[in-house]
């Protein structure tokens, strides 16, 4: 699986959009970009995933660059409960059960 | 519907003992995978089961084993516990697409984990 690079930490003001970047320059054609988050002492929670096109769901939006070498997770209106470690993971669809978690980005939403 | 259930949530063992952790996946999910999370190594894949068969295994010693039952519930066992086995053990379930359990582009649903402390 391709490796990802994320900033170790980010801050965001409550109510503002949080934009979390991820580099995955070695991604291959059949690999998806997944985003999960983990709130302290809980199991990881799926947020969104995409292949080529931008995706949006009730939690977030995923913007993938045209060359697919990077992506951005957008939380449109961050709340204090969004404080968590966010993981960007690249994996082929056939083995999405075997995810390689990096260190992720600790997003702190401040009041 | 009910989420992934893991038991026990917390347990304390001593070195040399063995432990069995249980995971009940979301109803209808046939794939169960296990992860270990420690402060030093982060989240690491242990193994995955589908239809009572282990399909993939991470880089862990043979002391770590698992199985899956016909109702998709899964257990993992760690024998001869070491201090370094202290960790949060997470179970995740998913539903592969297709009749043969083929490629799955869906998400993993994680349980709250079993926190093991080895003294």
Image: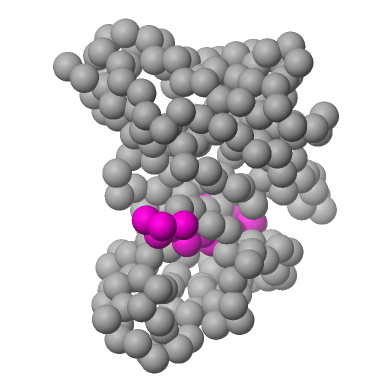
Q: Residue furthest top?
A: A16
Magenta part of the protein: which range? B25-41
Point 70% across, 27% down: residue: A25
Point 61% across, 34% down: residue: A4
The answer, for residue A4, to whether it is visible in the render is: yes
* Displayed quadrant of residue A44: top left
Point 56% across, 52% down: residue: B93
* Displayed quadrant of residue B85: bottom left
Front residue (pair B25, A74): A74
Residue A1 percent location from the top left of the image: 72, 44
* Displayed quadrant of residue B55: bottom right
Q: Is residue A92 left or right of residue B47?
A: right
Q: Is residue A17 left or right of residue A25?
A: left
Q: Is residue B39 left or right of residue A34?
A: left
Identify the image's colour scheme: rainbow, by chain, secondary structure or one colour: one colour
Front residue (pair A44, A19): A19
Q: Is residue A95 left or right of residue B13?
A: right
Residue B26's place in the image compared with B105, above or below, is below
Residue B23's place in the image compared with A84, above or below, is below
Quadrant containing the C terminus of chain A is top left
Residue B78 percent location from the top left of the image: 48, 80
Point 48% across, 53% down: residue: B43
């Amino acid at each position: 699986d391709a490796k990802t690079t994320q900033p170790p930490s980010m801050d965001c003001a409550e109510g503002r959009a949080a934009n979390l970047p991820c580099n995955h320059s070695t991604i291959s054609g059949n690999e998806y970009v997944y985003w999960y988050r983990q709130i302290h002492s809980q199991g990881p929670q799926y947020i969104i995933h995409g292949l080529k096109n931008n995706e949006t769901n009730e939690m977030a939006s995923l913007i993938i660059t045209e060359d697919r070498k990077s992506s951005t997770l957008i939380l449109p209106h961050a709340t204090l409960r969004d404080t968590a470690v966010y993981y960007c993971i690249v994996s082929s669809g056939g083995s999405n059960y075997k995810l390689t978690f990096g260190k992720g980005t600790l997003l702190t939403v401040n009041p | 519907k009910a989420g992934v259930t893991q038991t026990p949530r917390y347990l304390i063992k001593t070195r040399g003992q063995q432990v069995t952790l249980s995971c009940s996946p979301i109803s209808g999910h046939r794939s169960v995978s296990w992860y270990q999370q420690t402060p030093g190594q982060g989240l690491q894949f242990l193994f995955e089961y589908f239809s009572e068969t282990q399909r993939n295994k991470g880089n862990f010693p043979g002391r770590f084993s698992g199985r899956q039952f016909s109702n998709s519930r899964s257990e993992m066992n760690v024998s001869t516990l070491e201090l370094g086995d202290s960790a949060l053990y997470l179970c995740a379930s998913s539903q592969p697409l297709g009749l043969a359990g083929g490629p799955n582009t869906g998400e993993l649903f994680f349980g709250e984990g079993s926190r093991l402390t080895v003294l």
